[in-house]
Image: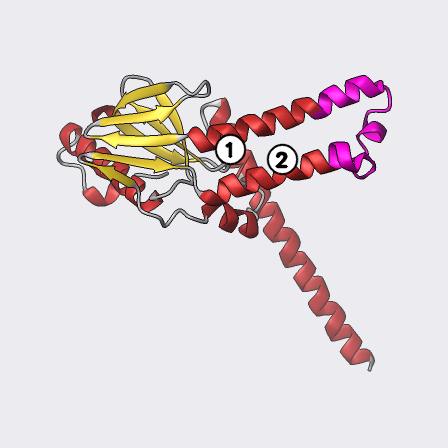
Amino acid sequence: MSDNSFVVGLLAAMLAFLFIGWRVRAVFRTYLKVRRAKGLGDKLDAAVGHFPKDIVQEAMFRAGSERPAQQSLTRLTFRTTPGVILVTLLCLIALFYIGFVRPELGQLEEILPAQDPETIVWIKLGIMALVVYTLIFNLANSITIDGTDLITTGPLFQRRYHDLTKLNRISLRQNGNYVLRFSDGKTVRILKYVTGHDELIRALENALATNQERTCPNSPKSKRSAVV
């Protein structure tokens, strides 16, 4: 019996040592990624990447991404997935319920005891307004590729135009955005969770490969990674 206890204890100690070593290694690798990142956004993204993604949330956001893009002559239009819109709507309903129907569930008054009731109400309205804006933006958001033109939706719902012949880098952020960088110094962020996602990535990869072929004709195509 004592021999079995010793073996079990030894195995438990080994597993604990391996787990600690694995986590230390993960923290060290994240530290190196943060240190190597150049901009503040890249550093924050490298730090957030240390934490695992919620696979259920990821699946919900991606729901509808397999739908084809809207096509009209040479134009392809990609819109926010139904999954993102549904999740945002559910968050809005939940916030309203917790904030105003059953405020005791939110306990915002206990979190901010120094604030008067009127301020608490304004804070709740502010949070809801932000989610309402997010919902409206997701409904209006579109990404359009028309020839060499990339047309995106700005934060004030304005249309922004970018020249795909100047695209020189694509990177994926942990927050679900693709960051596109252009040779003229411009940067644009587009949502990952869109209908026709695979068509969008193929179009961007083709534009990037064409640009790299033009600037570096001797560069092996296998090294032209689109999403980094």
Q: Is residue 107 magenta?
A: yes
Query: Which mark is drawn over residue 45?
Result: 1
Q: Is residue 48 above or below residue 61?
A: above
**Labels 2 and 1 touching (C-beta < 8 A):** no
Q: Nearer the viewer, residue 16 or 201?
A: 201
Q: Could you tell me which quadrant the N terminus lies in?
A: bottom right
Amino acid on which the number 1 mark rests in the picture: Asp
Determine whether, in the image, residue 226 is placed left or right of residue 8.
left
Front residue of 222 and 3: 222
Left or right of residue 78: residue 44 = right
Picture coordinates of residue 224, whole percent (x, y): 25, 39
Q: Is residue 224 visible?
A: no
Residue occupying the point 34% across, 31% down: 143
Front one among 29 and 140: 140
Asked whether 86 falls inside the magenta stretch, the response is no
Q: In the rendered image, which residue does mark 2 sit on?
A: 92
- Residue 182 appearing in the image: yes
Q: Is residue 95 left or right of residue 67?
A: right
Q: Residues within 10 Å of mark 2 (few under 14, many from 20)?
A: many
In the displayed structure, would residue 66 be above or below residue 50?
below
Q: Earlier in the sequence, mark 2 or mark 1?
A: 1
- Examine the residues drawn in magenta and state their main secondary structure: helix
What span is in magenta? 98-124
The C terminus: image quadrant:
top left
Q: Quadrant of residue 172?
A: top left
